Image: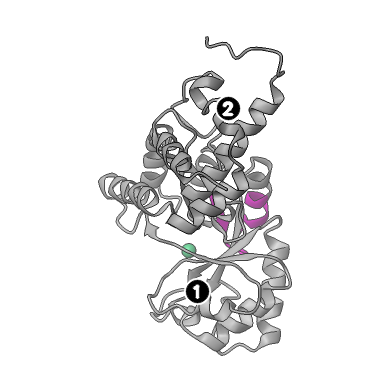
């Protein structure tokens, strides 16, 4: 039987700044790779958790895919899709009128041109992504490659999520565009908005481009990301991604102080009276299967495992 009166103070303890916390996850994707070597190389110098989306038929597609992979960045195929407005299009832009075979051919070629991609997102695509049948042909093809789809949301009526139903393709959505307005002030404002949305909702995905202002803002602001926000690749936000990502030292700018076991965890006596799995079930039934409920589980499991690893003959000493 679980003591919920014990679980609630633990929950509150976790919310204190010294406790293990579940950070908000922010994914940033830089689109349109393949044309601007200098700017793109600057992006690749940023933390590896920045994801990059590479156009499949650009002069530097293969080279940038190789470099991004070597430097640990997650890669997306930035698949050109037909927009509603008339503008110059990339070669092999996916159109709603294309049949399944044509779409399969273009996607297979894109996968060949952008090696090591984990996902795909749409370049333009307001016409293509708002066509359900056309997007079903895209998702049917993607399901053979285990690629996720990031909906760039270039139109509010995008059918990408609906089209993926039943295919096994995981879809996530862009929440913020960083640089529709390319002034430094505007990019900074959008960057701050993305951080706030991640803090509020637990996660957010922002998309930017290799513009000089975007490069500058990311260079300046990423090192001062708030301690409760961790930069992650897009795949960390997929429904199948592990629910808990504790910030690594590499990702946190502000390190938490080293705490003794006695400061970190409830006493061994009280931890022995609770079972993490059963407590998680109780908390989940009370507050829902939120990241917080999962944090309770990992916190309790961590404490009880840590006590078990300590020799029972050794008294607990407070430093
Ligand atoms: Zn694009």
Q: Secondary structure at mark 2?
A: helix
Please rate how many residues cluster around mark 1, counting C-alpha atoms within 10 Å: few if below 14, some from 14 to 19, many from 20: some
Distance from mark 1 CB to nearest ligand 1 atom below 8 Å = no
Q: Is residue 17 above or below residue 193?
A: above
Residue 179 in magenta stretch: no
Q: Is residue 264 above or below residue 101?
A: above
- Looking at the image, the residue that sits furthest to the left is 185
Q: Give the Cα distance between marks 2 and 1.
A: 67 Å
Label ID, residue 269: 2
> Between 14 and 285, which is closer to the camera in this rendering?
285
Label ID, residue 195: none
Determine which quarter of the picture holds residue 155: bottom left
> Between 101 and 285, which is closer to the camera in this rendering?
285
**Percent position (x, y) of residue 130?**
46, 82
**Percent position (x, y) of residue 224?**
39, 32
Of the numbered discs 2 and 1, the one sitting upstream in the chain is: 1
**Percent position (x, y) of residue 195?**
37, 47
> Between 104 and 266, which is closer to the camera in this rendering?
266
The stretch of residues the image draws in magenta is 51-65
Label ID, residue 89: 1
Please tell me which residue is depicted at 44% across the width and 62% down the height of the picture. 174
Determine which quarter of the picture holds residue 212: top left
């Amino acid at each position: 039987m679980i003591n919920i009166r014990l679980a609630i103070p633990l929950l509150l303890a976790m919310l204190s700044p010294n406790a293990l916390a579940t950070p908000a996850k922010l994914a940033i994707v830089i689109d349109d790779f393949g044309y601007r070597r200098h700017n793109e190389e600057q992006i690749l110098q940023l933390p590896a958790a920045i994801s990059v989306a590479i156009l499949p038929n650009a002069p530097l597609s293969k080279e940038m895919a190789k470099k991004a992979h070597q430097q640990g960045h997650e890669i997306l195929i930035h698949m050109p899709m037909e927009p509603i407005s008339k503008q110059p299009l990339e070669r092999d832009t996916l159109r709603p009128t294309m049949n399944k075979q044509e779409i399969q051919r273009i996607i297979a070629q894109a996968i060949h041109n952008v090696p090591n991609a984990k996902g795909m997102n749409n370049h333009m695509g307001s016409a293509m992504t708002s066509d359900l049948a056309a997007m079903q042909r895209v998702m049917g093809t993607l399901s053979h490659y285990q690629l996720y789809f990031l909906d760039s949301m270039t139109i509010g009526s995008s059918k990408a999520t609906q089209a993926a139903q039943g295919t096994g393709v995981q879809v996530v959505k862009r929440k913020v565009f960083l640089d529709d307005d390319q002034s430094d002030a505007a990019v900074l404002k959008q960057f701050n908005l993305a951080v706030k949305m991640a803090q509020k909702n637990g996660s957010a995905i922002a998309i930017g481009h290799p513009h000089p202002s975007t490069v500058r803002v990311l260079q300046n602001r990423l090192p001062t990301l708030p301690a409760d926000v961790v930069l992650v690749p897009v795949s960390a936000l997929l429904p199948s991604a592990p629910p808990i990502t504790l910030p690594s030292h590499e990702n946190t700018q502000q390190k938490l102080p080293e705490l003794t076991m006695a400061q970190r965890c409830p006493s061994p006596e009280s931890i022995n009276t609770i079972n993490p799995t059963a407590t998680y079930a109780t908390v989940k039934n009370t507050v829902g299967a939120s990241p917080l409920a999962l944090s309770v589980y990992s916190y309790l499991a961590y404490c009880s495992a840590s006590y078990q690893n300590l020799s029972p003959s050794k008294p607990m000493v407070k430093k």
